[in-house]
Amino acid sequence: MRRSSIVVLLAVVVCAPAGWTGAAVLAQPAAHHRSSAVAPPSGEPNPFRSRVRGGYSPGSATRAPSGPTPLVGEAEVTASGRPASGGADGGVAGSATRPSQLLDLRNWYLTLPTGSSGKPDTVRQPDLDGYSSRFFQVDPRGDGVVFTANAGGVTTKNSTYPRSELREMNGDEMASWSNRTGTHTLSVRQAVTELPKAKPELVTAQIHDAESDVMEVRLEDKRLIAQYADGEKEFVVDPDYALGTPYDLQLVATDGRIDVLYNGRPAGSIPQSGTGWYFKTGSYLQSNTEKGDAADAVGKVVLYQVRVIHAG
């Protein structure tokens, strides 16, 4: 080693902060960091390591936004095979002007609180990719999609409550599956931002069958609950939810039961099985003008991420 090199080496070692070694300073290359997947709590299954219906491949890692714990497996796979922050057409949070730039909507259709009595408007693919309205639009920050349902809105023939809500599809066909085989997971990051005053209630996510809801995750004032058995049974997911707080929710239907996870932790399990099931998410208001709310009173849910995985 030449004398000049020895002098440089000694200078680096002397000037290095306490606890560092000359070898570390000289030899360690610049790090190229990647976000790593969040491991589930001990004993919990990780459905995101499983096969995704449709042959999609795992997406690349992304940094989770500030707030709640990142969704389990977020860095490993998304339903679209894309980073969780982008929609079907590759939009980036903060620059999006339509919902499809933030959410992958290819396997969903939208029901709106507009239309004629018993026949609300629906938007299906490919129209949904370019659709935006005051009931379904990018929020002012550009990082989420706002679902708005008003108390005076149009309802479906089997309900007295209006909705702005996504319904799961399987390509051009209505999704229909059973939790008696495989593992079926809906994962969302969402926040309820507004409730009507007279009856402050809405449904943010649900599993449905051909006739009625199988289970619902619903906010009743400050109580976020999972309700099932035609509303006769429930368990509390969050006893004191504050409007505007983002949270991660997973519904995992497998082996004759439905597990509910809230911010990465088990919230409860529903011992129920069936067929013809599908997922829904958005703002399904549980009030109307007959309940005392004004026609323009609204319930709003912001959806930041959504993905569905069917494995096995």
Image (cartoon, helix red, strand yellow):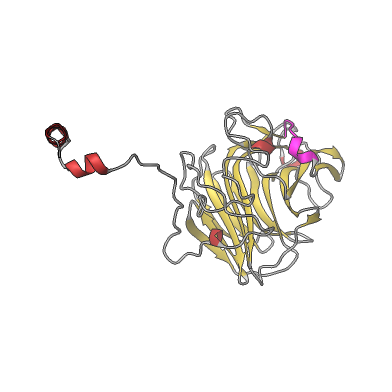
Left or right: where 125 falls relative to 30: right
Quadrant of the snapshot with the N terminus: top left
Is residue 27 at least partly visible in the picture? Answer: yes
Query: Residue 258, percent across and down?
Result: 60, 64
Asked if residue 78 is among those painted magenta in the image, a careful observer would answer no
Which residue is drawn at the image coordinates 75% and 64% (left, top)? 276
Examine the image and state in which quarter residue 197 appears.
top right
Which residue is drawn at the image coordinates 49% and 51% (left, top)? 263
Examine the image and state in which quarter residue 92 appears.
top right
Please say if 49 is above or below 27: below
Query: Residue 153, percent across and down?
Result: 78, 37
Please say if 222 is above or below 146: below
Quadrant of the snapshot with the C terminus: bottom right
Give the magenta-colored segment's residue range.
127-135
Is residue 20 at least partly visible in the picture? Answer: no
Asked if residue 133 is among those painted magenta in the image, a careful observer would answer yes
Query: Residue 290, percent across and down?
Result: 76, 41
Which residue is drawn at the image coordinates 75% and 35% (left, top)? 130
Which residue is drawn at the image coordinates 74% and 39% (left, top)? 129
